[in-house]
Image (cartoon, rainbow, N blue to C red):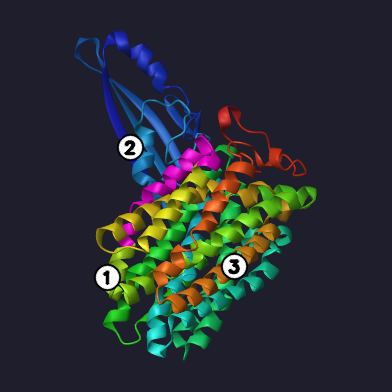
Amino acid sequence: MATIEQTWEFSAAELDTELASLRQSRHDLLIETPDGPDAWTMTEGPFERYHRTLSIDALAGGASRVSERIDYKMAVPFWWPYLSLLMKRGLRDRNRTPRRRWWWPREVVATETAQLIGHLGAIGAMAGYMGVVIGQTITFAAEEFGSSDADQANTLAAVRVGVLLSMVFIARADHQGRRPLLLRFTLAAILLTATGALAPNLWALGTSQALARGLTTGLLTLVALASTEEVPAGSRAMAIAFMYMTAGFGAALVVWVIPLADFVDGGWRIIYALCLLFLPVLWRVAKAMPETRRFRAAATHQAPGDINWKRFALIASTVFIGALFLSPASQMRNEFLRDDLGFTATGISGFQLLISWPATMAVPLGGHLADRYNRRWVGAGGLAVASVMSAISYQSSGWVLWVAATIGFSSASAAVPALRGYQTELFPTRARARVGGMIDVIAVAGSAVGLVVVGQLAVRWNSLGDAISVMVWAPLVVAVIILAFFPETARVELEDLNPTDPALEPQIPDGGSRPV
């Protein structure tokens, strides 16, 4: 339990007005209800426990001292330490008018929703680690196995074939629920990723990680789907921003341990084995994570799951085209740094950590702007800037490399919350997982094509940087398509975008909502 205590001194003339304000039940971060004289408890909010009390002491000269005490425990498992200072500041604030904060939505977040988001974030972090491990380590594995740049690119492309496995099973989430598939995918991904530590050659490594990568791709899709499905209309981009940050946290863990490749012979293998440490985390998630309220409503009402194929074609085309550049630019970064610029494993780790640090602020900023203003401009603008700066970074060294890579990574991070939600928002509840699986396959196809093309061009031109930079046209085309054809979905309820879905339980006045 955390405690907030604050005291004010008011003159006799001020006391009645100030007390009237402090005695009002809160309806901003949570919804309070009276619990006796000058005491309040929580009706709904992101806390497991909450209690607020006031005490009044007379002072000399007719003045009074008013003390407020708030005892609470946040209902966001795993991530509450990162939110605690911000939440404490919000609870201390005397301005209790419902409003949007850059770190928290305007709507009241229900206890169950807060718990689900926290558990989804934990799964996202595990998936983030397992999803990037082969891309971050393949340059060291290839050196041990005596493989070329083209071999690496082809292996990374082949790894993506595993997404077909994900597509086959992920559709079950539209019938069985998000929770069962999330737990099963996570367990299987952990065990399969760990087998990479035993790989005798690049082919075996690629085979094991093809299966694991397919599952982690499905995990990230389900995490984004479930989070945006659960939160209110004005917070979907913010929810994706949080999930992206947790996945980035997991990916950063890989970067932190990359120096093992320098310090220990075959140290890259340890990085695969470390994911077994996620098993206790998964056990805790399995004990407490709820199902999304929208899936429960759709299952109860047997809602149809028809796909709007025009919407699907629009999203699928942009995903495929964008992946032609974005995947090679991301996956081949370490090879470029090590082979072309002479970075060590420790140097690569430092570079990745430093250029990604500003993105920790760009992600929530992008989510905030996308929810408050306009999804299309935030997403398309961020994507265009990210692509151009990433291409420049592959033609640079020294400070230009650092600046271009930092701007590119931050811009891409800001664009994700604005764009990632479209494949959830534009399809009904009983079709979202199926659509997500198909989109994953299309994204992987674009990624594989991009990696193979870049690998062949790198060999022909003897320049990985030139091979990647020449593909920058692809995301620029995507940015134009987004601005010209994508609908604006910010602050629109999913049931308004998909009328065949059943309406949820009516909202609490002033924007709060209870879980179904």
Q: Relative to residue 228, is residue 367 drawn left or right?
A: left
Crowdedness near tag 2: few (<14), some (14–19) or many (≥20) residues, C-alpha within 10 Å: some
- The image shows residue 421 at horizontal and vertical percentages of 58, 49
The residue identified by callout 2 is 4
**Mark carried by residue 444:** 3
Which secondary structure, mark 1?
A: helix
Mark 3: amino acid: Val
Can you name the residue that lies furthest to the left here?
60
Which secondary structure, mark 3?
A: helix
For residue 137, what is the image quadrant? bottom left
How far apart are the two marked residues, 3 and 1, measured between alpha carbons? 29 Å
Residue 240 or 142: which is nearer the viewer?
142
The residue identified by callout 1 is 347
Q: How many marks?
A: 3
Q: Residue at x 43, y 75 (%)?
A: 461
Magenta stretch contains residue 505: no
Q: Residue at x 41, y 72 (%)?
A: 464
Q: Quadrant of the C terminus?
A: top right
Q: Relative to residue 323, is residue 77 drawn left or right?
A: left
In the image, residue 191 sits, relative to residue 323, either above or below, namely below
How far apart are the two marked residues, 2 and 3, measured between alpha carbons? 49 Å
Magenta stretch contains residue 374: yes
How far apart are the two marked residues, 2 and 1, measured between alpha carbons? 43 Å
Mark 2: amino acid: Ile
Residue 7 or 484: which is nearer the viewer?
484
Of the image marks 3 and 1, the number of the one nearer the N terminus: 1
Residue 349 visible from this viewpoint? yes
Crowdedness near tag 3: few (<14), some (14–19) or many (≥20) residues, C-alpha within 10 Å: many
Instruction: Provide the major secondary structure of the magenta segment.
Output: helix
Give the extent of the magenta segment.
353-377
